[in-house]
Image (spheres, grey):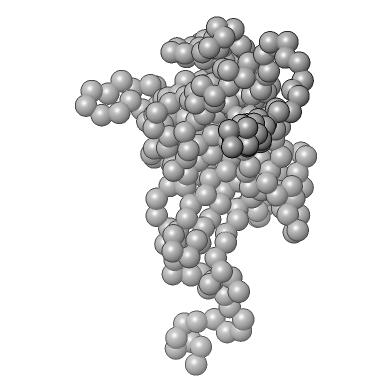
């Protein structure tokens, strides 16, 4: 009986072990996200996480930013109370 | 019997008992942007659609808005008979308005002819230098006169500049104000009959 139990236990253990699919090697390289400026101005901002300085020269300018900075940069806006039923003047949008 | 009522004989058309009130909203966009209808099915160039490179901008809370024209007129005067007619030339079309909001500076700088803004949180800077006389704007001014049915009148100007800045009044107890004029010039890229702009009315119940 004891040896049978041991055999069942081993089978269960084997079933629980899932071998992860092999991942491509990581070289710790930051991924980037392209953000386009939505306002007519030169914008200079520091990456909130990376500390890297980014500059958009004009509306429509596209800059690749570190992925870790993108989310907070996308929340940046100019002005607090947009008129005329307009939406907030967000500085950036993602380039698809 | 026509003499009794005073109405003319034959085919007549009459105006509508429809009175508009209030000013249109005023939007502007870089002249290099294409109008939304470029042209429409009838050959008219009008409408506005903001793009990432050329955002459309809305002016908030304008007052004293008026539509004017710069027309040059010279009488055809015959000394033997008198004036037989007038030769008129439209030089420009103006929308004059008084601005009461000055933020963000990136928009005010375009209206006032200051330099392009520099934005670097938490500051926004513009320089007071000289004018960029090569900067032109497209203007879109809609007035919705029946919000329930969406009836509206649109003034679209093709190629305008902000000119004739008035005094910036630092009023105590009331908003700062400054008067500007959006002056639309002849745009020779558009057909002769719509060199300066276009009026568009959309009213499904009236225009059937």
The one nearer the camera, B30 or B172, is B30
Q: Residue at x 68, y 18 (%)?
A: A31
What's the residue at 63%, 16% (across, down)? A66
Q: Position of residue B114 (x, y in %)?
A: 53, 16
Asked whether, in this view, residue A25 is left or right of residue B46, the answer is right
As drawn, which residue projects farthest toward the bottom?
Answer: B1
In the rendered image, which quarter is residue B81 located in? bottom right
B151 over B44 or under it: above or below: below
| Res B92 seen here | no
Q: Residue at x 33, y 22 (%)?
A: B169
Q: Residue at x 53, y 12 (%)?
A: A49
Towards the viewer: B82 or B92: B92
- B128 vs B81, left or right, is left
Residue A82 percent across, percent down from the top left: 43, 34
What is the x, y in percent for residue B208? 60, 74
Residue at the limit of the structure toward the left, as seen here: B173
Residue B107 image point, x, y percent: 51, 25
User: For residue A84, which quarter of the picture?
Assistant: top left
């Amino acid at each position: 009986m004891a040896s049978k139990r041991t055999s069942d236990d081993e089978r269960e253990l084997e079933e629980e072990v899932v071998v992860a699919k092999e991942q491509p090697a990581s070289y710790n390289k930051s991924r980037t996200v392209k953000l386009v400026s939505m306002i007519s101005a030169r914008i200079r901002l520091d990456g909130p996480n990376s500390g890297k300085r980014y500059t958009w020269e004009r509306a429509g300018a596209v800059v690749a930013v570190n992925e870790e900075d993108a989310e907070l940069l996308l929340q940046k806006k100019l002005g607090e109370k947009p008129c005329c039923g307009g939406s907030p003047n967000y500085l950036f949008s993602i380039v698809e | 019997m026509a003499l009794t009522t005073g109405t003319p004989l034959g085919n007549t058309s009459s105006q509508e008992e429809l009175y508009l009130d209030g000013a249109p909203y005023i939007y502007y966009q870089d002249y290099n942007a294409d109008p939304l209808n470029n042209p429409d099915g009838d050959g008219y160039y009008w409408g506005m659609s903001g793009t990432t490179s050329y955002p459309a901008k809305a002016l908030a809370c304008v007052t004293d808005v008026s539509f004017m024209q710069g027309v040059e007129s010279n009488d055809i005067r015959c000394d033997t008979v008198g004036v037989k007619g007038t030769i008129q030339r439209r030089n420009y079309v103006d929308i004059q308005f008084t601005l009461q909001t000055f933020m963000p500076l990136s928009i005010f700088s375009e209206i006032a002819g200051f330099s392009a803004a520099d934005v670097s949180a938490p500051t926004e800077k513009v320089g007071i230098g000289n004018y960029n006389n090569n900067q032109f704007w497209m203007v879109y001014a809609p007035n919705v006169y029946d919000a329930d049915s969406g009836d509206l009148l649109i003034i679209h100007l093709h190629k305008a500049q902000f000119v004739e800045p008035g005094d910036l009044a630092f009023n105590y107890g009331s908003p700062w104000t400054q008067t500007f004029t959006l002056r639309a010039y002849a745009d020779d890229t558009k057909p002769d009959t719509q060199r300066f702009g276009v009026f568009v009315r959309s009213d499904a119940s009236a225009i059937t």
